[in-house]
Image (cartoon, helix red, strand yellow):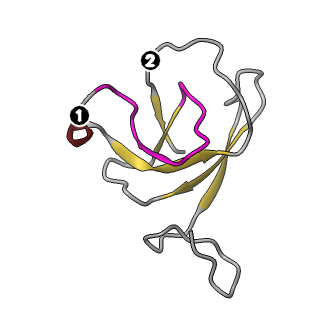
């Protein structure tokens, strides 16, 4: 990540970083804060609901080959959390 003089954060491909709160997105019902970039996005902007991410990810988490996975930008969880169960990878489009 690079920090230009005006203080706005950018990803390595010069895309600005965004921040979003997903209402009720955490297992305890509180809002889920995510930082994201449109870097590597080829299938619309979406985040995974099945796992927290503490390193950027850009794929749907399926067991498909990297070539056959959806790529919906890069997301990073700001809050620490753990899913109550692991139903398998699920995604949701960013509103």
In the image, which is nearer the foreground, mark 2 or mark 1?
A: 1
Whether 38 is drawn above or below 49: the answer is: below
**The C terminus is located in which quarter?**
top right
61 drawn magenta: yes
Secondary structure category for the residue under label 1: loop
Whether 87 is drawn above or below 37: the answer is: above
Few, some or many residues within 10 Å of mark 1 (<14, 14–19, 20+): few
Q: Which of 45 and 74 is in front in this view?
A: 74
Q: Which mark is residue 65?
A: 1
Name the residue beneath numbered marker 2: 88
Few, some or many residues within 10 Å of mark 2 (<14, 14–19, 20+): few
Whether 32 is drawn above or below 86: the answer is: below
Secondary structure category for the residue under label 2: loop
* Percent x, y of residue 18: 60, 60
* Percent x, y of residue 77: 64, 42
**Residue drawn where x is 56% and y is 46% of the image:** 55
Q: Which of marks 2 and 1 is nearer the N terminus?
A: 1
């Amino acid at each position: 990540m690079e920090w230009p003089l005006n203080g706005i954060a950018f990803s390595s491909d010069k895309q600005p970083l965004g921040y979003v709160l997903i209402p009720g997105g955490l297992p305890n019902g509180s809002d889920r804060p995510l930082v994201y970039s449109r870097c590597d996005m080829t299938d619309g902007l979406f985040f995974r609901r099945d796992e927290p991410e503490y390193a950027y990810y850009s794929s749907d988490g399926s067991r498909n080959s990297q070539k056959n996975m959806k790529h919906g930008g890069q997301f990073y969880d700001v809050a620490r959390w753990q899913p109550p169960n692991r139903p398998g990878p699920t995604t949701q489009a960013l509103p």
